Structure formats: structure tokens, C-alpha cells
Amino acid sequence: MSDQGNRRSILVGYDESPGSEQALRWAVEEARLRRLPMLVCHAWQWPYPLRPISEQVLVHLENIATNVVHNGVDHARGFDARVEVRPLLAKGPVSAVLLDAAHEAALVVLGSRGVGGFEDLRVGSAAVQVPAYSVRPVIVVRPEEPAGQSSVRVVVGIDGSPASQAAFAFALEEAALRGGTVRAICGWWDPGALPGPDQLPFVDAATMRAGAEARFQQVMSVPTSQYPDVPVTTDFVDERPPRAIVEAAKGASLLVLGGHGPGVRSGALLGVVTQAALSEVHCPVAVIPFPN
């Protein structure tokens, strides 16, 4: 996913929330490792359904927004003065602004929730909408300070879909950039083993399991000569995929998933595994779009 030739930027959403502060840190490191410039983006809009009373109100809001984005630029430069950082201030909904800017980015980084929402909200709307529709990889970062780690461990979920193949390639690249390892995991469960609405009668579980494992091994057999020094381990486990991924991501530096795999429900923005990861996993989660 190298975009160094045309100097695409690392795009980060920033609104001064704790999550966006952590996203800013991650984006600075990503820009440094990839030797790319960085774009700090802040979206603003009139927050009420009724029109503002006067133009002066809008001017005041824009001035506040301008201060926010420049504060983000200053913070980013404070993290690493070697990274080229520029501001992007745009009027409109956060998700729409980030998705529009993503077309010219190498990847997008944002916090799991912004300044809005209720106190116990785990994932904000932008952290779901942007990964669901972005044409570029999106990394969603939690507001918690990451625990100190002696080594970088990247976990990637594999289900055999084109999106998971792209996720594996991204995981290898991230591990190579950070001097880490990759653990590739695939969770499988027998759809006829449990009672309830998920049970499927007359299913040849052995054949289905063999097919799932074959798809997993097919992805793992793709030559990785571009990253010969990245250690890769593989796990095919008998567990529901969402639970297998959440468990595997404990203590990881980064979890990488495809945005859509098999079994996506009609009307769902993201697959069930990705939804579970964004809600439950504590490390940053990278969501990789379906390759064009």
C-alpha cells in the first residue's frame, strides 16, 4: 500500500476529544514510518436543526473550529517535528468530510468516539461510518493510553474473502514498518451445533470446516517475499469468529480486519466481526476496504 510516489497524506480526524488525541499520536507515528505528510482534519457545522440566528454566529463557530484544527497541528508537530503537518478545516458532518478527504489520502486515522454522544458510548457514528464507506484503510484508535509493549504484535483476521486478503497484506506492511510480528487467525464454528435461530439443519459440518480451513490456508500461501523478515504465525480455531478475534486481540498492538467478509447481514455497514472488534477490542483496529 505504498503511496510515497504521489505523496498521499495520512489523514487524521481531530476534535480535541481524548480519542482524537490518541489518533493524532498514532497518525504522527504512521506518517513518520511511511515518510508521508500528515493532514489534520476538523469538521464543523451548525449543531442544531434550525438555522442560526445570524451570520455572526456562524463566523464565531468557524473561528472556534479554526482554533481546534490549528491546536491539532501544533500537537502533532510537538509529537514529532520531522513530520510535515497541514490543517484541513471543512464545513459539514464529520463522516462526510473525512470520507471526501480520504480519496486523496493514503489511510485515515480517527478516534473511536468524538466529543458528542453519551458518557459510556464505546463507538461513535464516525468510527462506524468512515470504515464502512472509506476507499482507504481506516485505523480506529481508542482514547485509552496504550500499555507499554516490549514488542509489536499485529493480529489479522482471515476469512478467505478478498477484503481479508487485503487485510493480511496491510498487516504485513504494518509489522514490517514497526519491526513486529503477525498472527493470522481464522475462527470457525459449526452452525448446526448450537440451538436457537443460528442453527442450520442438514449441514455437513465437516465439509464446511474443511472449506473454511482451505480458504484460510490459501490466503496464507500467498507469497510474502516483500516482507521476508516478518515472522508470521497462523491459528485456525474452533470458535465463533467475533469471539476468536476479540480474544486474539488482547494485548495486541494492532488488529487488522477486512470491512466486509462472508455472512454480512443485509443493511449492515460492517461485518459482524468488525462490529464486535470496534466495540470490544482495546487496541487500535484497522479496517481494510474491499479491493477494487
Image: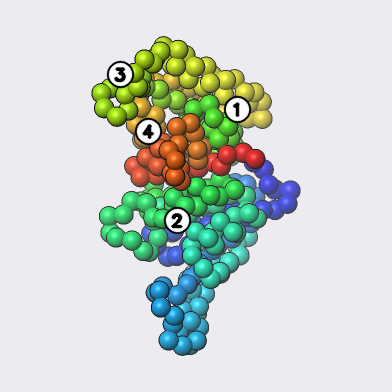
Disc 1 packing (10 Å; few <14; some 14–19; many ≥20): some
The amino acid pointed to by label 1 is Asp
Q: Nearer the viewer, residue 221 or 250?
A: 221
* Tags 1 and 3 touching, CB below 8 Å: no
Are the residues flagged by discs 1 and 2 in contact, CB closer than 8 Å?
A: no
Q: What is the residue that sits farthest to the left in this orientation?
A: 195
Counting residues from the start of the chain, the first of labels 4 and 1 encountered is 1
65 w.r.t. 290: above or below: below
Residue in the image at 41% along x and 78% along y: 50
Callout in the foreground (4, 3): 3
Q: Which residue, as the protein is rendered here, is positioned at the far right? A: 5
Residue type pointed to by label 2: Ala
Q: Nearer the viewer, mark 2 or mark 3?
A: 3
Badge 3, how many Cα within 10 Å: few under 14, some, many 20+? few
Q: Quadrant of the N terminus?
A: top right
- Quadrant the C terminus occupies: top right
Q: Quadrant of residue 178?
A: top right
Looking at this view, is 53 or 225 the one in front?
53
Total tally of numbered discs in the picture: 4
Point out residue 86 in the picture as x, y percentages from the top left corner.
61, 65
| Residue occupied by mark 1 | 229
Q: What residue would you read off at disc 3?
A: 193
Which of the numbered marks, if any, corresponds to residue 126?
Answer: 2
Label 1 or label 3, whichever lies nearer to me, is: 3
Look at mark 4 in the image and give the residue it sits on: 242
Label whose residue precedes the other's in the sequence (2 or 3): 2
